[in-house]
Image (cartoon, rainbow, N blue to C red):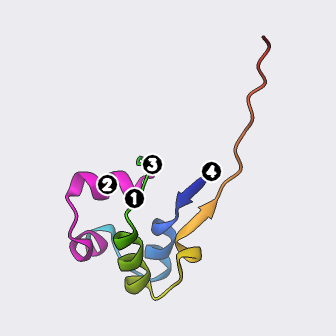
Amino acid sequence: MIKLDVLTLLEENGKTKYWLYKRLGMSYQNFNKMVNNETSSIRYEVIEKLCGLFNCSPNKLFALEPVMSKNRTL
């Protein structure tokens, strides 16, 4: 599963979630869902803005976490 790893970037850069929230100009509800990986999509404009704020490529914004398979018996 691909997850937004913005909390790590904030920590590495000594910034807070509030700092990021103010710069993105999103509603707090959408921002909170995005930061906590509770959304299924992120707009390209937001990815571009995040890259600019953290001076990084999109590869640095995301982390790939292994998906645990579920064994099902039919």
Quarter assignment of residue 74: top right
Question: To which residue does mark 3 refer?
Answer: 40
Which residue corresponds to mark 1?
Answer: 35
Q: Of the residues shown, which amino acid type is indicated by label 1?
A: Val
What amino acid type is highlighted by mark number 4? Met
> Percent from the top left, x then y, of residue 62?
56, 66
The quadrant in which residue 48 appears is bottom left
The residue identified by callout 4 is 1
Q: Amino acid at mark 3?
A: Ser
Q: CA distance from mark 4 to mark 1?
A: 15 Å
Is mark 3 in CB contact (under 8 Å) with mark 4? no
Q: Is residue 7 above or below residue 29?
A: below
Is residue 14 rendered magenta in the image?
no
**Where does the magenta region start and end?**
19-37
**Residue 12 in the image: above or below residue 41:** below
Q: CA distance from mark 1 to mark 3?
A: 12 Å
N-terminal of the pair, mark 4 or mark 1, is 4
Q: Earlier in the sequence, mark 2 or mark 4?
A: 4
- Real-space Cα separation, disc 2 to disc 4, in angstroms: 19 Å
Q: Residue at x 39, y 86 (%)?
A: 52
Q: Residue at x 75, y 35 (%)?
A: 69
